[in-house]
Image: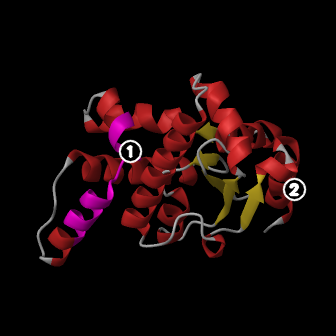
Amino acid sequence: MRVITVSREYGAGGHSIGRKVAEELGIPFYDRDIVRETVKESGFEKNLVEKEEEEASKTDSVLKSICSLSGSYFHDPQEAIHEVQKAIILKFAQQGPCVILGRCADTVLKEAGIDALNVFIHADELHRAVRVSEMTGIKNATELQKTIAKKDSSRHNYYTHYTGKKWGDSNNFDMTLDSGTLGYDLCVKLIVDAAKNVD
């Protein structure tokens, strides 16, 4: 059985689906554990790790690209946090089959030569708005739309910055599932079946 990575649009239920897949397969699920390990290994405060781990702005990405091209290594908390998280993701993956949520794990493992089943979870705007409203308590439609767009933009910029690939592009994943259309239970079943049957 492979390691499974789950990337997801905000509000598409990727966390819930990933956790349920891990439960069904009897393997570890890593999300908050990565934050805890990063805090322990890096010495950074938990709040800083949570803020920086998926918050690469377009401006940051452009600036860091320029610095990279100029031959200087751009030292900042986010770069350090990402490097620590890469090492933690590899450590968890090397321990055996597991489910790893987000954090460019698909590319981290591929670059390390570790075979993984890479899944992307997406959903329509209405489904996501309902879920985000339940999670955050936000009721205003405009505010919900802005919250979802901001979170997705952050994830997109972070993924593109650290992988050079387009976030959500089906070419980067083994499976892309619409949780709004399929429902969470079927998404879980499809991933579990794939994990059991793919060499």
Using the rendered view, name the quadrant where residue 128 is placed.
top right
* Three-letter amino acid code of the residue under disc 1: Glu
Q: Residue at x 47, y 62 (%)?
A: 108
Q: Is residue 120 magenta?
A: no
Labels 2 & 1 near each other (Cβ < 8 A): no
Q: Residue at x 50, y 34 (%)?
A: 33
Query: Where is 109 relative to 133, above or below?
Result: below
Specify few, some or many for label 1: CA neighbours under 10 Å numbering under 14, 14-19, or 20 or more: many
Q: Residue at x 29, y 33 (%)?
A: 48
| Coordinates of residue 101 in the picture (x, y in percent) | 58, 46
Q: Is residue 52 magenta?
A: yes
Q: Which residue is mark 2?
A: 193
Q: Which residue is mark 1?
A: 53
Using the rendered view, name the quadrant where residue 118 is placed.
bottom right
Decide if residue 13 is in sight here: no
SS assignment at label 2: helix
Q: Earlier in the sequence, mark 2 or mark 1?
A: 1
| Coordinates of residue 52 in the picture (x, y in percent) | 33, 42
* Three-letter amino acid code of the residue under disc 2: Asp
Colour convention of the picture? secondary structure
The reply, left or right, for residue 192 in relation to residue 110 is right
Specify the principal SS of the magenta part: helix
- Depth check, mark 2 against mark 1: the one in front is 1
Q: Quadrant of the N terminus?
A: bottom right
| Coordinates of residue 186 in the picture (x, y in percent) | 88, 48
Q: Which residues are magenta?
A: 50-65
Decide if residue 75 is in sight here: yes
Q: Residue at x 49, y 58 (%)?
A: 104
Query: Of residues 156 and 15, which is closer to you in this image?
Result: 156
- Say which mark, if any, is on residue 107: none
